[in-house]
Structures are given as structure tokens and as C-alpha cells.
Image (cartoon, rainbow, N blue to C red):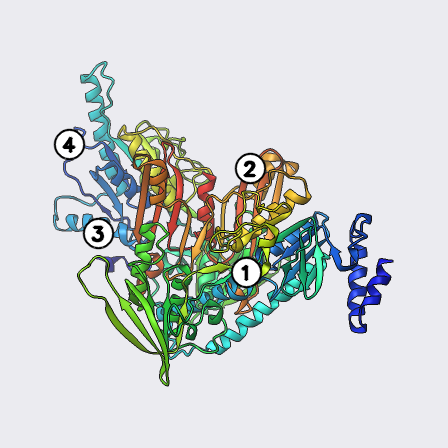
Amino acid sequence: MAALYRGRHRWKRINCLHIFSRKLTGENDYDLLVIGGGSGGLACSKEGEVLSLLFLNFSRGIFEEPANNMITFLLWLVYSITPGVFSRPTMAEAVQNHVKSLNWGHRVQLQDNKGHSESLLTNIVIATGGRPKYPTNIPGAAEHGITSDDIFWLKKSPGKTLVVGASYVALECAGFLKGIGLDTTVMVRSIALRGFDQQMAGLVTDYMEAHGTRFAWKSVPNRVDKLSSGALQVTWTDTQTGSEHKDTFDSVLWAVGRAPETKALGLDKLGVQLNKETGKIVIGPDESTSVPNIYAFGDIGEGRPELTPTAIKAGKLLARRLTGQSTELMNYDNVPTTVFTPLEYSCVGLSEEEAEKRHGKDGIEIYHAFYKPLEFTVAERDASQCYIKVVCEQGGTGKILGLHFTGPNAGEVAQGFAVGFQ
Amino acid sequence: MALLKQLARTRAPCWFLLRKQFFLSLCRRGVISSGMASDLSEITRFDFLVVGGGSGGLAGARRAAELGAATAVIESHKLGGTCVNVGCVPKKVMWNAAVHAEYLHDHGDYGFETGDVRFSWETLKAKRDAYVSHLNRIYRNNLDKAKIQTIQGYARFTNDREPTVEVNGRKYTAPHILIATGGQPSVLSDAEVPGASLGITSDGFFELETLPKRSLVVGAGYIAVEMAGILSTLGSKTSLIIRQTGVLRNFDAFISANCTKELQNSGIDLWKNSQVKSVSKTDKGLEVTVVTKDPEKKNDEEKISTIQGVDCLLWAIGRQPNTAGLNIGEMGVDTDERGHIIVDEFQNTSRSGIYAVGDVCGRALLTPVAIAAGRKLAHRLFEGKKDSKLDYACIPTVVFSHPPIGTVGLTEEEAIKTRGKENVKIYKTSFTPMYHAITSRKSQCIMKLVCVGKEEKVSVISSPDNRL
């Protein structure tokens, strides 16, 4: 079973859909329909206590999570021992069919219950998350390159690797590849860790460079060719000088962004509004989409942080709202996050740039310090990039707007402070 | 006039010292005032005199100097006090080494073939000592840069009317004197436990030249737990003798129970309900006689056991304040029955013009607390901030056990006692950290939030992962 999913598959082409369902009738047997069995989807359905209809996309992500794994596996098992009951439509078809059946039921019910204020609808929650993107305009990119999905399944070492991208995914992967002793290069089109505090981003990449990771700044790849030796030859342009360069690598890892899995769902047919640029679902503060009774949250929501704990919390709160237990909305402010680069970076709240934008340069006060972790002293390790920065409001109570920390165990350190931000 | 008198009394070698002292005194604002002319010849006056160059003393002195006070620090040993020399810093270095030892066990699981790895205590000690010396020098430089005078020696209050301190025959005074002499490990006398002096304390731990083969640690507080953990993890066969049934008895019961369990799981031989009766020296090492009696089983006889071949007996049974030689009684400075200086919330002692911070006061024996209290005091005395004081509530603290423990705020027991059981809500979790997902060695992480009232204000976070 799991073996079927090893190797390098293009998930866009093979979308396996496993449906576990008690009854598919026109009546509303289910209060909550959750599509997507990742962090958010599972938390939402578990909270809703109605694991009625769970569409599972057997992505590798799920297999990496032992806890989620179990539920997913059990459901898969149930499906596999009841063959022939279900066909294997594409996810889109199935969703559309089901929604249509629900709509029919909905219409019938409303007609029967004129003036009844109680809602008898099944709510549909889309939590299908995202997938790493492949560049579409670079010859050889898809054929010869891999993404973060694949890196965790490689049986052999990736060898000398080129990581294209400067997101946290790119830097983290490059970080651990270099850490285990592989020759690693990071190719950055413009800036690193876009969206993060840029001073902190600089410290993170400075540390990586000082410790042997090569950086090809302001460069864009042109093509990837496979040589007869099996090695990959990458040609790229240094956009600052205009010169072209070539080098060979054993692996090329594309970390150029993530895209939501919405095409397969056929959401456009349902009338769900998507952001044209990102393809993500446009949602309100209560996770509602442009179509009544259809909600979306997690990585697939436009403007939402792509983080598991956030998806879990949002999913739980959504389930509680939809089952009438509460009206509490998810608070997306001050969500702490950590970048697991060789020098860990963690932050909660606003970056210095964002704080300046909102309060003006004179409206903020920065407290900061470089420090030397005790762990580095005996080993005489270079601590030049270990740094703490607290961005505060100028005057008044000096409220803390953002906290930034680079150093060992940054994530654990920031977690405690994040509680204080709430 | 005063200078001539001074010079006349001294012998040649001291002349330079006095000249420097005089020069420095002249450099200070308001050092020599006309009101003092009668007894000036023997007493050097400062704005702020600090007895004790440890965490609290130095922080207070430096902040006072920044605020314009002419300051001097008296230190009998090394700058940095307990923390830098025989406490926090070297302890943490040893703990980090122990963490490396633990990680070595996990290397195989993570795909690294490391083969036979040998540990050299000597190498570690040399590097640790070098780092501590480096800090001593930094502290000295900081004082010099701040133009704070450093006086080496033991201080003792004199019988002078105005609070005056004598060091090596010279007298010093100031309208504000801070006592920050810290503390030292408690020991049992040979009268209390025959052979007790054959053991060492945490001070002695940092003088050990080699890893002891067989260690016996006595005590159930955080120092005992940390010492036992370090010794055991670095390879010493270690036993821990505790009088009751668990360690860290003043911590939240959940934390205390988990720590006790993890200690045993890590291979430390834990002796509950036990005490050391006597110690003797043999040619094979120390022989320690231990008495065990379970108070629950009143009819049982006490069991007497002997542990042989001990090459390190470490007493970690508590700490006591360094007030004995100060002669503060003469000054009217009150102390409690154990010698701790009694202070109010502003660090005032019972004698006007004399203050105390840090371990010598016996409350929250932690470096950051002493530093904060020292600084708050400096602001109150030299910046006119009348309300400047340290809030001693919710002070976070860490025990560097394996796994480490971090805690802040009230324990569940304290919360129930102060707010009533019906007002307390507990959130608990227990899990195996992802780090251990692929290691054969496992360790549990537990977390507890004690919340009070309708708003569920968090009272404590306890977690064996101290970074949190």
C-alpha cells in the first residue's frame, strides 16, 4: 500500500481518492464534510466529532505524520476491504456530485420547512492544503528536478545539490543537506525569506554562508539538462552582471513556492472565488468562502500562514462554530513561527519593516543585542549572528510589536514569549 | 594637610598605593568633604560601597556608577561570585557536556557511525576554567571602565558611628552600603555525621580533576539533581541519597514526580527515605553507611547499608548565607535564624543606609534576580526613583536535569491554597518530543498550565524542556 506511493510521482497526475461513507443519500446525514486529511482537516473533523465523510488525498505529507497516519491508514484499510462498493472518480467529480446531491436535499428541505429557522445544511470544509510548485518555464525542471515532497523519500543521498529558492523551505533543506556533509548551493532570485524581517534574514543567510553553504545571489536558472553520466547540468544567469554560468549537480531541488490543490476540486464550477494570482481560496475571518456553506482554511486559504498549529486551531474553532458550540473566530495575529535553518530563527509579531510601515519610523523603538550562547563557548564557535531584537511602540506603554531571535533552540525560546503576545 | 598626614604614616611600598588611592579619590565627585576633616585620615569615602563582587553586587555597582555615584566594590575571592566561578556558568558548561554525551547515544539512530568515543574530563575542565577566567577578566575590565574601584579582601563592619567597613586594615565608608556577599554550600560537621568532612560540596565539584568512578550525591534539591545528572551522564556510577521519596519537593508535584522517575530511568541509583550515617576512608575509597527507614512502614526496622569504593561523596544539602564574618550585628542589621539578612521589598535592612541583595537575603537564589534587585536599588538610591523595587512574583527558574525543567509562577498546590480548588483549572499534556521519534533512548516531555479565575490567567508553566 505505502509502497505504491514511493518513488517520484507527479501528484497532479495521480490523484487517488478514497471515500469512506456510510450513506450517500439525498438526506443530510452529515453535519460536516471535510475535504483534506492533513493537519487542519483532521483536527476539524475530530473536533466536529463527525468523521462522516472524509476525502483523503494520500499525499506524502500524511505519511510523515505518525498521528495523522493512523486515522488515515484505518480509513484506507476500511476502503480496501470493501472493494467494488466505490468507484474511483476523480476528486472533482465526486465533490461536485456530492454537493449537487446536498444542494438538492437542501432545496427539498427548505421547501418543506417554510419559515423554519433551523439550518439543515451540510457544511463543506475544504482543507486540501498545497503542493510544492515546479517552475513551468525552465526546460528540464520537472523531468530532472525534485521538490521538498521528494527529498524526504529519497533512498539515496541527493549528493551535490542545488536548491533553487530562498523561502524558509529552501533554506531549511539546504541547511540540513549541508549539515550532513553534502556540497550545497542555494540559488536566490532576489531576496531571502521574503516576508520575514530582512535584517534577521540576513543573519540567517550570513551564518549559512560562513559555514560553507554556497549562495548564488540574484540568479535565475535557465535550463536543466541530464548528462550521460547521470549528473544534472544547470545553466543560470546572474541577473546583476548578465553573465551565464553552468555547473553540474547530482540533484536539483525546486523550492520556489507552494500552490494550492484547487484545480482538481473544480471549485470554479461551484462558484468559489479564488485569488487569481495564487489560486488560493478567498475567505473571510470566519473561514467562509463566496459560496454559502462552503468553508476553507489552512494552507489553501488566501493570506493565511501556512503553519500546522494555526490550521489545527482554525479547524477546531471552525468545527465548533459550525456545530453551534461557539462563535469564537480564529485569531491570526501574532502567530509565532520558526525557521529551522542551521542558525535557528524564530519570531512572533511584526517585522521591523512592517512595524515601521504601520507606526512610522519615529513611532517605534528597537531594543536589540548580539549575544553568545553558552553552548558555543567551549567549542569556540562563531556566534556573530546570534541576535535578539524586540520592536516596540515608541512611547505609551512601549507595547511589544515584534520579537525576533536567532540562536540555538530559537523556536523553543520564542514559544514562551508568544504566550505573552496573546 | 590631610594628604601630608597620610603620607607621614605610611611606609614606602604603600606610598604608591595610597597615592593612587588618593588620586582616585580626588577624581571622584564629592569624595572629600569638609564635614569629615576630623576622621578623614583613615577612612576613604564613596557614594556607594558594595560588599561582594558577585552577580548582585556588580550589577548594583555598575548601574550606580552609570548614574553618577562614586562606587567601590569589595571582593574577597574572584569577581563574578558564585555564579561565574562555582555556580551557574561552570555548571551549565558541564551540563552541555552531559547533553553531548546523551546525543552520542543517539548518533547511531540518526545514521551516524561514531564508533568508540572517549571522554576527557581534563580537556573539558581546562576549557571550562579558561572560560571562567575569561569572564573574571571581563568583569574586572567592566569595573575599570566604569571607574569603579575594586578592593580585594574580606570586609568587616567596624565599631565606628557611621557604618564603616574595614578591609586589610583600611577603612571605607559611604552613605549607602550594599551587602551582596552571597552564600556557600552547607556542610554537616563531623560531630553530626562522622567523616562528613571526607565529602565535598558543589564548590569541590568544580575542583575535581578527573571524573569520579563512583559518586554518591546527598540531597534532593536542584543542585543535588543537577550534580547527580551530570556525573551519571558523563559516566560516573552515581547514587542519590534523599531523605524522603521524591526530589524537588518544592516544585509542582507533577514535575517532581516526573523528575524523580527520569532520574531513575537514566540509571541513577536512587535511595529514598535514606540518610548518611557515617563516612570512613579505606584504601579502596570512601565507605559510606546509609540508614533507610520508610516512615509509612512504622513497624519496619531501619535498614543499614554500606556503599563502598566511593571516590566522590558530594553533599548538596542546602546553602547558607555569607554573613558570619561581617560583624553586621554591630550595625543593627537583623538576620533570621539561619543568618540571612532580613530586607523589606526595597532591599532595605533594619539599619538605615545599609541594603542587601542576592543570595545573602535567602529569597529566590538566582543570578538574574540578584542583578535585577541590585539595579532597581541603584535607580532608587541614585536616580531618585522612590518606588524602584523588584517584583519577586513569577520568577522563572530552570533545573538542568535530564530532561531539563522550566517553571514560572505558582505550583498547582500553591494556586489551590491561595485561590481555592474551585477557581483553579489545570491543563496538562505529556508527549515524547519529536527528537526521540527515531531514537531508542526515549524521554518524556510534560507540560502543565495552572490557570486561575474565570479569565484563566496562567499561573505556571512547567516543562522539561527548559528553553520554553
Q: Mark 2 vs mark 3: which is more N-terminal?
A: 3
Question: Between tags 2 and 1, which lies in front?
Answer: 1
Q: Mark 2 points at which residue?
A: A399
Q: Name the residue under label 1.
A: B324
Q: Is mark 1 on a helix, strand or loop?
A: helix
Return the x and y of residue B364 as percentages of the image width and height.
48, 51
Quarter holding the C terminus of chain A?
top left
Q: State which chain disc 4 sits on.
A: A
Q: Distance between the residues labelled 1 and 4?
A: 87 Å
Q: Vertically, is A219 above or below A264? A: below
* Image quarter of residue A246: bottom right
**Front residue (pair B316, A173):** B316
Q: Residues within 10 Å of mark 3 (few under 14, many from 20)?
A: some
* Image quarter of residue B438: bottom left
Q: How far apart are marks 1 and 3 (CA)?
A: 70 Å
Quick check: A190 left or right of B218?
Answer: right
Question: Between tags 4 and 3, which lies in front?
Answer: 3
Q: Residue A25 carries which label?
A: 4
Quick check: A330 left or right of B306?
Answer: right
Q: Residue at x 65, y 51 (%)?
A: B177
